[in-house]
Image (cartoon, coloured by chain):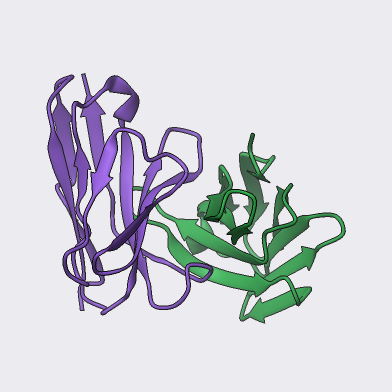
Chain colours: A green, B purple
Amino acid sequence: DQQVKQNSPSLSVQEGRISILNCDYTNSMFDYFLWYKKYPAEGPTFLISISSIKDKNEDGRFTVFLNKSAKHLSLHIVPSQPGDSAVYFCAASGWESTSGTYKYIFGTGTRLKVLA
Amino acid sequence: NAGVTQTPKFRILKIGQSMTLQCTQDMNHNYMYWYRQDPGMGLKLIYYSVGAGITDKGEVPNGYNVSRSTTEDFPLRLELAAPSQTSVYFCASSATEISYEQYFGPGTRLTVT
């Protein structure tokens, strides 16, 4: 049961245009959401995050939008640059009271290719 | 400032062998984590630690053991390696609560044959 889903395995965008990466989650317990970027043969690096009490967070060219009613978040990159080509993972975190455990769940990733 | 370091980078094990994946962080973070990433999948949490002497299971702990005797080190032990443990293993750390951003090491690619 995949609780955090990234339904697009890959995305190609022209340099200078907007990249939009999407992520859906199923469990209402998640209250903090993050995006990570991963280059080949490296570990993921943190990009941007958003708390469930907000619907938007912006950091330079990167903006994350959260729609709690739809259980959906998206990452917008404007303008896209060739150096943004990487795999992007969304992650959701929260305390699961039924199991008494902390959950930090990653999506399966979207490979973004920015074409020069 | 090296951040999170992992050794080895690559390893091939035979079925039934054991090994320890090393992880060290120099950021004085209390929280540390071990993940595995299988091809085409997201990262799955194996174990985590909220401080020296305290560890807890994540989503996929079976076949692994951890210990945390110091703030800096969080080794992951594989006993009786199985082909299903072929994966890329990432160690991470964070300064604050588990919710927030984590800093990852470069990963260890493990193959069990």
Q: Residue at x 32, y 58 (%)?
A: B55
Q: Residue at x 74, y 47 (%)?
A: A26
- Tell me if B8 is positioned left or right of B89 in this view: left
Which corner quadrant holds the C terminus of chain B?
top left
Q: Percent x, y for residue B29?
A: 31, 76
- Tell me if B89 is positioned left or right of B67 in this view: right
- Tell me if A116 is positioned left or right of A18 in this view: left
Residue B64 position by quadrant: top left
In this rendering, the answer to whether B37 lies above or below B26 is: above
For this orientation, the residue located farthest to the right is A69
Q: Residue at x 22, y 72 (%)?
A: B71
Q: Percent x, y for residue B68?
A: 22, 61
In this rendering, the answer to whether B39 lies above or below B16 is: below
Q: Please indicate, yes or no, whether residue A17 appears anywhere in the rendered image.
A: no
In this rendering, the answer to whether A84 lies above or below B18 is: below
Residue A19 position by quadrant: bottom right
Q: Nearer the viewer, residue A27 or A61?
A: A27
Q: Please indicate, yes or no, whether residue A1 appears anywhere in the rendered image.
A: yes
Which corner quadrant holds the N terminus of chain B?
bottom left
Q: Percent x, y for residue A108?
A: 56, 42
Q: Percent x, y for residue B109?
A: 26, 39
